[in-house]
Amino acid sequence: MLQSNKFADYLETVRQQIRWKRAQTYVLEEIENHLADQKDAFQRDGLDEETAAIRAIAEMGDPVMVGEQLDRTHRPQPDWPLLAMTALLIILGLSIQFIIGTDINDGMERFYRQVTWAGLAVIVFLAAYFLDFTIIGKYSLIIYGLLMAIALGDYWLSGGGISGYNTAIYPLLLFPTIFAGLVYRMRNEGYWGLAFCGALAIIPIILISFMHYLTVLFLVGTSCLIILTVAVAKGWFRVRKLYALFMVYFPSGVIYSTMFFTMINQEYVRIRLQAALNPSSDPTGAGYMATLVQKLLSHSQLFGEGLPVGDYGYYPIAKILPEINTNFLLTYLTHRFGWMLLIGILVIFAVFIVRAVLMSKRQKSALGQLVSLAIILTFAIQVLTYIAFNLGFLVFNPVSLPFISYGGRALLINTCLIGFLLSIFRTGSLVSDKVGGAGIKAGRLIQYEDGKIIINLKAAQ
């Protein structure tokens, strides 16, 4: 009892020196474990329990000095380059929407609306940035259920069809992140945990297939496959990797093949795919938009406005190309301002994604790695499908160009995701995985050592 009081007094003095409250629990647990280990070592050398406790505290050093040193080393560490690039992309997006607003009908009204959305997005970003990202691991099943309910509610309350999926797709962009939390929860549950994660991934994929939105289906399906592959490859499910990968990829192949052949049997899908692969086969019909995009890009210059396109003469591009503030924003910018502007935007996105990947690999915890990977995949696939669409490959309708294209829902979702991502990079150094993970006991509850029965209370937590 005496040694417990001495340890408690020492830990309380250390705690008072650490200003970041979130770091206190993590740091004190580490110090307490070290004190207990050191005390046990002294007892094995023949010291009594009280003397061993005093010696352990003396070995640790002055609690004020220890606390001050830990306070300096355990502080939130914002990733300033990614924060700066996030702010840059938001400002760049508003600037581009302002320029477009002068070219299209009701453009300025849409610009002011986007400014309002941007203000809300900043609030969402800050909320996600300062939120404890570990809630995704702790409450993943609850969040999963709420997310599916919201997506279904949006779809059915909007009457289904196009209007239904236009609202429901945005909550589903959060699914890969929540799925990462589910994988973390089940990571030590063996084959059954792997199968459970796969079953939970199928539900939103089926929902998306009803919406006929190939881009989101590709985004969610690809992200989930990569997340599961990484978890299996790192041995987090504690299964034979070859068998586990077969469990992941064989049913995925069957499901996607079935969906593909079901869709390809529909005439409009075949026509659209043929037009995307070979627009010149029907330049005035299904391949019209792809042909137009290719013509505009071929007439674009390195700097400045592009050359007139065929029969359109000097007709403004805003009158020729539709949806320049949403789906065809990059095509519009390239023809009006030159390829260098497009290259500059792509460089910013490329640097952002590469930096995020490097930071993700530095995370100490499986949760931090999985969740950051899921967010990066969601962000990167949006960017890549948008670029492909604006280069004339019109198979996947773009969801958004994050932070830049017009649209409030997409802006809110993407700022929420990037806020969470930067929250991981800011505080992830304090998150570590307990041995055993969710659903598995950390070691044996009752152990016998040196003639004593030891009840491991941490194993029962």
Image: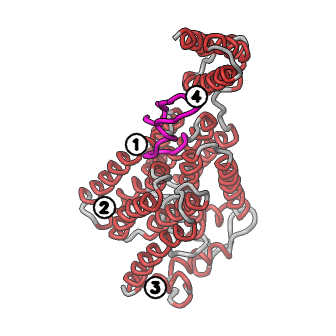
Q: Is residue 203 left or right of residue 403?
A: left
**Residue closest to the eye, 72 or 250:** 250
Question: Quick check: is 180 in the magenta stretch?
Answer: no
Residue at mark 3: 285
Q: How is the image coloured?
A: secondary structure
The image shows residue 42, relative to residue 122, as above or below, that is: above
Q: Where in the figure is residue 132, as x and y percent of width and height?
A: 50, 35
297 or 60: which is nearer to us? 60
Measured in 3D between alpha carbons, the distance from the residue under mark 2 to the one under mark 4, in whole angstroms, is: 45 Å
Which residue does the numbered mark 2 point to in the structure image? 164
Tell me which numbered mark, 1 or 2, is placed earlier along the sequence.
Answer: 1
Q: CA distance from mark 1 to mark 2?
A: 28 Å
Inter-mark Cα distance, 3 to 2: 27 Å
| Real-space CA distance between mark 1 and mark 4, rounded to the nearest whole angstrom | 20 Å
Which residue is located at x 65 percent, y 66 percent? 335
Label 1 vs label 3: CA separation?
Answer: 49 Å
**Callout 4, which amino acid?**
Tyr
Mark found first going from the N terminus, 2 or 4? 4
Q: Please say whether residue 110 is visible from this viewpoint.
A: no
Query: Where is residue 244 shown, x and y percent of the image?
Result: 52, 67
Residue 112, horizontal then vertical, whole percent: 46, 43
The nearer-to-camera label among 3 and 2 is 2
* Residue found 64% across the figure and 23% down from its top: 40
Marks 1/4 in contact by CB < 8 Å: the verdict is: no
| Residue with the mark numbered 1 | 139
Nearest-to-viewer mark from 1 and 2: 1
For badge 2, the amino acid type reads Gly
